[in-house]
Image (spheres, helix red, strand yellow):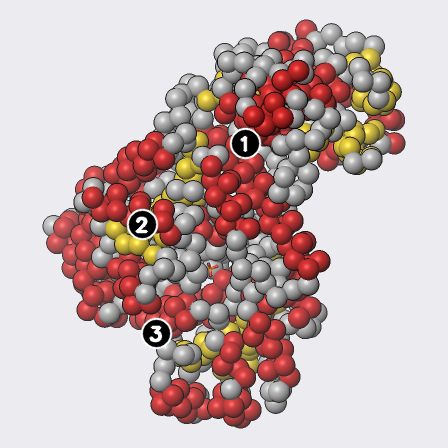
C-alpha cells in the first residue's frame, strides 16, 4: 500500500496537510527529520504512516503516560497494532508486552524515555528490528524549553546501542531557535530535513477583555459559559485558590464542572480529568498543571481567568482549543493585578539546579516573557499578528479574525498626555517605575511621593483627574512603540528612548485606539471568517448533530473510550453534511476509515436514515459553504475599510521640499473620508521602509534611532540632526519630494494591496 492508501484505509482522510507529505517522504527515503508544527497540525500521522510502511518496528518516545494511552487507543481503533510500555503497567504486563513485541506483534510501540535505560528494554531492543525511533514532544530535550526531561538527553545513547542505526524523527510544537538548535544537536540528527510549518492556528479566535474587578470577571465568565452551553471548555486560573473559588461559583450556578490542580490527590485528579475527557462534565477549571498530554480534540473554548506568565504558556494552553480543526475561541480576561500575581509566582517558584549566573539569566528571561505577555493584553493591534511575531513569524497585515481586528476603535490624539508622561520621567531623572510616575502625574498625596520629594516637580498633578488605568495604558503603548524602554529586571524602571524627542518637539503625533463599545463580552459571533458548525448546519442539521453526538457518547461508554477517540466533532459535522446512507458514502466522510466503518459505521448510518426518513435533503446552508469574499464583505458592512490611496487623494497631496513622514501621514489622513476609511500610521510606513531596506533601526548608546541606509539616501531620504529642548543631539528622518512621491506610489501599488 502507498501512503495515500494507508491514509484512507486506516485514518479515513483523502489528502495530506501542509508539511505532512514532505516529512513522510523524507522519512521513507531514510532521512532523519525534525518537524516543528503547531498543536493540531497532524504531527502523529507524519510518523505513523511511515511506521506502517517500514519493515520493522517504530519506537515512539513520549513524555506522558496519558498521551501514550490516547495514541495507542486511537491506533487500535484504526485497526493498527500498537502498544505502550510505561509505569502504568505491572512488571508482568511489561514482560508480556515485550515478548509480544519480540515476536513482531506491534508495528508501533510507545515508551517513556526512562524505560530506555532498563535492562529488560535494552534486551528487547538489542534483538528487535527497529526501523525508526520517533521522539515526540522533542522540546523536552532542551533545558531552555519549559518541560525539560533529563532522560530525553539519554535517547542518543540508547540509539547508539542498537544493531543498526534507525531513522530518527523528532517532532515538537515549540519553535524558539534555542530549543530547535538543542534538538538538532543533542539528538545528533544526521543531515536532517527540518520542516517548520506556519504557527498560525487559523481556526482559533483570540480576544482579550480588560477587567477592572474580579466581580466583573465572574459576570463575564458566567455569561460566556451560558452562551456556550453544551460546549466543552477549559478555564485556566493562575493559582489553586482561584481554581477553587471559580469552581465553587460555577457549581453554585448548577454547571457540570470539574476542577484540577496540584493540591488534589492523584485519584481526584484522575477522576476529574476523566469526567472532562469523557464529556461527563463539559467544563474544567484548572491551573496550568492541567493539559499536558490532553488530546481531547473537541474543546470549543479556552478561557483564561488570569493572564499566564508567558506567551509560550498562553499559546500552549489556548492551543488546547479546537484541535479538531473546527472553530474555537481563546478568551483572556485581563486585569493589571494579574501581572503582580505572576511576578509573585515566578519569584517563588523552585529554582532549577543551575549556576547562579544561569539562574540570574533565567530569571531575567522570565521577566521579559512576562512583560511581553502583558503587552499582548494591552495592545490594540492584531492579536494573532502579535503572537506570530513573538514566535519569529513575521507576517504583515491584520487577521480580521481576532477581538482587536473586529472591534470598533476610535482614534484619540493623546500627544499632549504623552508629552506630560515623558516630561515627568525626565524630571524624575529616569529613576522610577510606572507606579511612581503615574502617582506623580495624578498629584497623589502619598508618603512615598513626599519622601522622594516629587510633589515639588512641575509635572506633579499635571494630569489630575485622569484615570489611573488610562495613564497606565498609555505608558504601555509607549513601551510597545519603544518610546519608553523599561529596564529588564523586576523593578522595570522607565527609561526614555531618543525618539521621545520627536513627540516632545511635535514632529510625531501619538494616537491611541479606544474601544467604542463598552468593554462588553463580544465574541466572534457572525463577524469572524472561520466557520462554526452552527454557521454551516441548519437547525435540523444541528439536531442531527446532537443525535449523532449522543450515539458517539453511548459507543464510547460501551468501549470505555473517550468520545473523541471514536470520532471527532469534525467527522460528525461531515456526516450531517454528506448524510451517508451506505458503506460507500460513509467511507467518504472525513475521518472514517475501514476499521471505524466496521465498528461504528452502521450505527451512525441507521440514525441518519431514521432522522431523514430515508430522504436526502441537505441540512447545510449552501451559501455559507461556498462563502464568497462578497459574503464576508457584507457581513462586515458598517465597518471601516482599510486605508488606501484613492485617485482623488493623490491629486490633492501637496509634496513639500522636505518633510517628515508624520507630515505626509497627517496629510493623507486628512484627505481620506474618515467615516468610511481607517487611518494610516507613520509606524506602518516606517516598518515597510525597513523591510525594503530604505531605513534601519539602530541601538546607539542604548537608544533606538532611525537611520537611513544607502538605498534610502539614493531615494531621497536623509538624516537631519537636531538639538532637543534638553540640549541633546538627535536625528530625524527627512524625505525630499522624490522620496515622498515614492512612499505614496508604494502605498498605492504595493504595500496596501
Ligand atoms: P498534533 O500532534 O500536531 O497536535 P494530531 O496528530 O493530534 O496533531 O492531529 C490533530 C487532528 O488532525 C487529529 O484529529 C488528526 O486525526 C487530524 N488530522 C491529521 N492529519 C490529517 C489530514 N491529513 N487530514 C485530516 N485530518 C487530519
Residue shown at 48% from the left, 76% from the top: 112
Q: Where is residue 726, by image quadrant? A: top right
What is the CA distance from the residue labelled 3 to the residue labelled 2?
37 Å
What is the CA distance from the residue labelled 3 to the residue labelled 1?
46 Å
Q: Which mark is residue 379?
A: 1
Quarter the C terminus occupies: top right
Q: 332 above or below 317? A: above
- Total labels drawn: 3
Q: Check disc 1 and report its element: helix, strand or loop.
A: loop
Q: Earlier in the sequence, mark 3 or mark 1?
A: 3
Residue shown at 20% from the left, 44% from the top: 252
Which residue is denoted by mark 2 in the rendering? 244
Judge whether residue 683 can be spotted in this image: no
Which residue occupies the foreground of this view, 178 or 451?
451
Image location of residue 713, percent across then percent down: 87, 26
Specify the quarter for ligand 1: bottom left
Asked whether mark 2 lies closer than 8 Å to ligand 1, one says: no
Q: Check disc 2 and report its element: helix, strand or loop.
A: helix
Amino acid at each position: 500500500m502507498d501512503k495515500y492508501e494507508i491514509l484512507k484505509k486506516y485514518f479515513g482522510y483523502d489528502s495530506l496537510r501542509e508539511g505532512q507529505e514532505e516529512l513522510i517522504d523524507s522519512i521513507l527515503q531514510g532521512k532523519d527529520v525534525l518537524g516543528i508544527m503547531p498543536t493540531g497540525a497532524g504531527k502523529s500521522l507524519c510518523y505513523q504512516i511511515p511506521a506502517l510502511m517500514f519493515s520493522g518496528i517504530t519506537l515512539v518516545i513520549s513524555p506522558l503516560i496519558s498521551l501514550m494511552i490516547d495514541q495507542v487507543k486511537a491506533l487500535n481503533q484504526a485497526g493498527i497494532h500498537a502498544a505502550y510500555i510505561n509505569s502504568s503497567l505491572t512488571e508482568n504486563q511489561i514482560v508480556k508486552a515485550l515478548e509480544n513485541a519480540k515476536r513482531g506483534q506491534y508495528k508501533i510501540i510507545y515508551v517513556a524515555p526512562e524505560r530506555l535505560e532498563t535492562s529488560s528494554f535494552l534486551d528487547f531492543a538489542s534483538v528487535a528490528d527497529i526501523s525508526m525511533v520517533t521522539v515526540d514532544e522533542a522540546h523536552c530535550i532542551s533545558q531552555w524549553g519549559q518541560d525539560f526531561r533529563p532522560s530525553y538527553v539519554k535517547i542518543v545513547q540508547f540509539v547508539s546501542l542498537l544493531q543498526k542505526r534507525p531513522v530518527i524523527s523528532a517532532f515538537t510544537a515549540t519553535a524558539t531557535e534555542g530549543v530547535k538548535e538543542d534538538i538538532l544537536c543533542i539528538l545528533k540528527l544526521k543531515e536532517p530535513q527540518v520542516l517548520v510549518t506556519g504557527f498560525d492556528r487559523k481556526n482559533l479566535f483570540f480576544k482579550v477583555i480588560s477587567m477592572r474587578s474580579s466581580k466583573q470577571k465572574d459576570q463575564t465568565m458566567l455569561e460566556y459559559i451560558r452562551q456556550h452551553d453544551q460546549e466543552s471548555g477549559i478555564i485556566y486560573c493562575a493559582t489553586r485558590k482561584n481554581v477553587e473559588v471559580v469552581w465553587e461559583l460555577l457549581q453554585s450556578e448548577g454547571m457540570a464542572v470539574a476542577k484540577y490542580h496540584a493540591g488534589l490527590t492523584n485519584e481526584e485528579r484522575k477522576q476529574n480529568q476523566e469526567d472532562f475527557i469523557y464529556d461527563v462534565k463539559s467544563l474544567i477549571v484548572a491551573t496550568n498543571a492541567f493539559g499536558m498530554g490532553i488530546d481531547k480534540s473537541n474543546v470549543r473554548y479556552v478561557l483564561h481567568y488570569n493572564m499566564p506568565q508567558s506567551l509560550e504558556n498562553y499559546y500552549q494552553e489556548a492551543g488546547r482549543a479546537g484541535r479538531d480543526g473546527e472553530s474555537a475561541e481563546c478568551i483572556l480576561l485581563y486585569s493589571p493585578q494579574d501581572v503582580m500575581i505572576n511576578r509573585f509566582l515566578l519569584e517563588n517558584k523552585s529554582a532549577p539546579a543551575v549556576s547562579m549566573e544561569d539562574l540570574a539569566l533565567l530569571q531575567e528571561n522570565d521577566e521579559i516573557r512576562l512583560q511581553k505577555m502583558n503587552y499582548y493584553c494591552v495592545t490594540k493591534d492584531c492579536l494573532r499578528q502579535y503572537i506570530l511575531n513573538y514566535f519569529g513569524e513575521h507576517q504583515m497585515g491584520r487577521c480580521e479574525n481576532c477581538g482587536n481586528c473586529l472591534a470598533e476603535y476610535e482614534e484619540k490624539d493623546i500627544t499632549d498626555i504623552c508629552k506630560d508622561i515623558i516630561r515627568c520621567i525626565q524630571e524624575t531623572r529616569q529613576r522610577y517605575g510606572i507606579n511612581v510616575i503615574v502617582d506623580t502625574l495624578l498629584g497623589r498625596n502619598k508618603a512615598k511621593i513626599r519622601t522622594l520629594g516629587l510633589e515639588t516637580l512641575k509635572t506633579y498633578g499635571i494630569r489630575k483627574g485622569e484615570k489611573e488605568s488610562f495613564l497606565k495604558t498609555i505608558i504601555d503603548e509607549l513601551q510597545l512603540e519603544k518610546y519608553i524602554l523599561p529596564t529588564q529586571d523586576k523593578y522595570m524602571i522607565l527609561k526614555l528612548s531618543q525618539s521621545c524627542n520627536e513627540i516632545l518637539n511635535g514632529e510625531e503625533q501619538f494616537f491611541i485606539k479606544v474601544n467604542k463599545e463598552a468593554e462588553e463580552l463580544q465574541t466572534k459571533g457572525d463577524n469572524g471568517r472561520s466557520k462554526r458548525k452552527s454557521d454551516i448546519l441548519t437547525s435540523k442539521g444541528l439536531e442531527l448533530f446532537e443525535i449523532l453526538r449522543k450515539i458517539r457518547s453511548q459507543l464510547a461508554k460501551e468501549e470505555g473510550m473517550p468520545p473523541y477517540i471514536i470520532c471527532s466533532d469534525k467527522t460528525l459535522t461531515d456526516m450531517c453534511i454528506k448524510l451517508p446512507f451506505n458503506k460507500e458514502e460513509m467511507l467518504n466522510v472525513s475521518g472514517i476509515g475501514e476499521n471505524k466503518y466496521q465498528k461504528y459505521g452502521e450505527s451512525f448510518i441507521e440514525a441518519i436514515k431514521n432522522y431523514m426518513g430515508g430522504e436526502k435533503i441537505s441540512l447545510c446552508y449552501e451559501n455559507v459553504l461556498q462563502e464568497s469574499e462578497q459574503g464576508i464583505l457584507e457581513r462586515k458592512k458598517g465597518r471601516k475599510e482599510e486605508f488606501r490611496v484613492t485617485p482623488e487623494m493623490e491629486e490633492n497631496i501637496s509634496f513639500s521640499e522636505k518633510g517628515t513622514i508624520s507630515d505626509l501621514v497627517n496629510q493623507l489622513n486628512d484627505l481620506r473620508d474618515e467615516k468610511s476609511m481607517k487611518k494610516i500610521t507613520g509606524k506602518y510606513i516606517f516598518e515597510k521602509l525597513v523591510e525594503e531596506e530604505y531605513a534601519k533601526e539602530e541601538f546607539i548608546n542604548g537608544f533606538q534611532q532611525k537611520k537611513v541606509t544607502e538605498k534610502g539616501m539614493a531615494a531621497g531620504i536623509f538624516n537631519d540632526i537636531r538639538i532637543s529642548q534638553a540640549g541633546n543631539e538627535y536625528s530625524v528622518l527627512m524625505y525630499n519630494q522624490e522620496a515622498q512621491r515614492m512612499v505614496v506610489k508604494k502605498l498605492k501599488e504595493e504595500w496596501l494591496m
